[in-house]
Amino acid sequence: MDTIVLKFGGSSVADNLKLNIVAQKVIDLYDEGNNIVVVVSAQGKTTDNLIKEAKELSNLPEEREMDVLLSTGEQVSMSKLAILLNQLGYKSISLTGWQAGIYTSKESQNSKIEQIDTSRIEKELEKRKIVIIAGFQGINENEDITTLGRGGSDTTAVAVAAALNAKHCYIFSDVDGVYTTDPNKVTIAKKLETLSYKEMLEIANEGAKVLHNRCIEVGQKYHIPIITKSTFNNKPGTTLQDKIEDTNVKSIVKNDDIIYVHMKYETYSPELFSKLLKLLEKNNIGANNFVNNSIHSMDVYFTIKSTTLAKFQNLLENDLKAFDTTYKNITRIAIVGHGIMNDNKILEEAIKIVDLNNLEIINLEINESKLALMFSQKLSNTILEQLHIALIG
């Protein structure tokens, strides 16, 4: 008997009507003779609302307590779905992350799954129960609840699929696959039938909110077929695979959630530079694109995610007061597809459009699968559409 893992995102379980749609998809696959494990996200905007309420109490709430708070959203979803399935005559049981044997690293808010003890899950499957697991959460060696970062339910699903040697892992959401760009920003975006894990990882790492980047890494490592589909229709989705089928541009990702930071100090020392790096790391502020423009003084540029800005501002008010610091919101656009480095026409077309719009590039990266351009300002979606027409059609 095959085991199939299904993950349903927040929009899929947002209310009781949508939970009934989810239940029917689960039942259809169960009735085909499969063992079914379901991983669920929090309903709708629950996580965003919990974060907002916490910040009304504290500008910087303790990360451990935020994990405790945010983990409740998925528990509501899992219990509601179990209640519904049992009412429909299908034996189901809901499990929190720790009940499902999901053990993570120590850190809060962005933990990594280290191992999964599947004994409880397998015990329930042997009874032909549908097992419903709260995504996005686990427990660490201190027996503290941990969360895996936004989008972490994807990683829960793929990790559970790997641990159970599942036949497939379906990621259901309100979109029916992976597109050549965000269809909410560019109406001519096209759905992709297949993508390599490598290409999908580049897309996720560039900020596309399609799949959690760590779920792709797990899928690639354990060769788990990941299929992204819509909860609300039966159209074919996008399948991730090892094979790279062609060498053209697959997707263009525009990320506006980037803060460009400039920090200055009158003298330079390795100790001061090291202090800055350690403070950013200690506070889980993932800084990228570091450049120091002077050997005589500190003249440092780097980028952070906009979601970490509050924590960074707190550092500026306390530990980093001596620095002269400015920051602003900017845009980064990544053009993704295997073989980009060997096709000069892609870079030429991109630069032509940049010049046509009188845009300033402050950083350019290129590798085998990606060309990334970072601009000095936040851009409209017009540039995204122009690049799509020129490079994809």
Image (cartoon, rainbow, N blue to C red):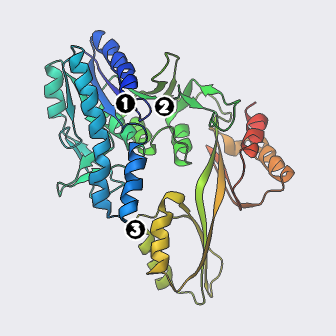
Please tell me which residue is depicted at 71% across the width and 52% down the height of the picture: 379
Q: Secondary structure at mark 2?
A: loop
Residue 12, quarter of the rendered image: top left
Which numbered mark, 2 or 1, is in the foreground of this view? Answer: 1
Can you give x and y, in whole percent of width and height, for residue 69 in the image?
Answer: 29, 52
Please tell me which residue is depicted at 31% across the width and 25% down the height of the picture: 166
29 to 10, vertically: above or below: above
Q: Earlier in the sequence, mark 2 or mark 3?
A: 2
Residue under label 2: 242
The Cα–Cα distance between marks 2 and 1, rounded to whole angstroms, is: 21 Å
Circles 2, 3 touching at the beta carbon (< 8 Å)? no
Q: Secondary structure at mark 3?
A: loop
Q: Could you classify mark 2 by the number of other residues whose Cα lies within 10 Å: few (under 14), some (14-19), or many (20 or more)?
A: some
| Viewer-side residue, 195 vs 229 | 229
Q: Secondary structure at mark 1?
A: strand
Q: Earlier in the sequence, mark 2 or mark 1?
A: 1
Please tell me which residue is depicted at 21% across the width and 55% down the height of the picture: 144
The Cα–Cα distance between marks 3 and 1, rounded to whole angstroms, is: 31 Å
Residue under label 1: 7
Can you give x and y, in whole percent of width and height, for residue 147 in the image?
Answer: 32, 50
For badge 1, the amino acid type reads Lys
**Which label number is shown at residue 283?**
3
The Cα–Cα distance between marks 2 and 3, rounded to whole angstroms, is: 35 Å
